[in-house]
C-alpha cells in the first residue's frame, strides 16, 4: 500500500498554485475529499502559504502571469 492509498490521506497537504481561479477550483473539488488542500494564486502568495504550512505535494502552474 502506498502512502497515497493509506487511510491517513486526510493528513496529507496539497498546495495548488495557479493564477486562474477556475483551474484552482477544479483541482480543489477533485482533491478536497482526500487531502487537505491549500491554495495560492501567485508565487508570492504560495511563498507565504509555504512559510506557515508544510506540504506533501505542490501542483504549480509553470506559466504564472507574474513570474516564470
Image (tube, grey):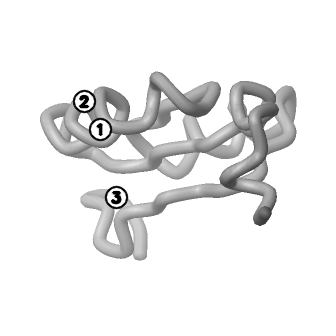
Secondary structure of the residue carrying tag 1 is helix
For marks 2 and 3, the one nearer the N-term is 2
Q: Position of residue 9 (x, y in %)?
A: 72, 36
Specify the label residue 63 is tagged with: none
In the rendering, which numbered label is found on residue 24? 1
Query: Dot 2: what SS?
Result: helix
Mark 2 lies on residue: 25
Q: Nearer the viewer, mark 2 or mark 3?
A: 2
Residue at 20% x, 44% y is 23
The residue positioned farthest toward the left in the image shown:
22
**Do the residues bearing badges 1 and 2 touch, measured as CB atoms within 8 Å?**
yes
Residue 51 or 30: which is nearer the viewer? 30
Q: Do the residues bearing badges 2 and 3 touch, measured as CB atoms within 8 Å?
A: no
Residue at 43% x, 36% y: name it: 31
Quadrant where the C terminus lies?
bottom left
| Residue nearest the observer in this picture, 55 or 7 | 7
Amino acid at each position: 500500500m502506498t502512502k497515497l492509498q493509506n487511510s491517513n490521506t486526510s493528513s496529507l497537504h496539497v498546495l495548488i498554485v495557479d493564477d486562474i481561479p477556475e483551474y484552482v477550483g477544479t483541482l480543489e473539488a477533485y482533491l478536497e475529499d482526500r487531502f487537505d488542500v491549500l491554495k495560492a494564486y501567485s508565487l508570492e502568495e504560495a511563498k507565504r502559504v509555504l512559510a506557515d504550512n508544510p506540504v506533501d505535494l505542490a501542483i504549480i502552474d509553470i506559466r504564472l502571469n507574474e513570474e516564470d
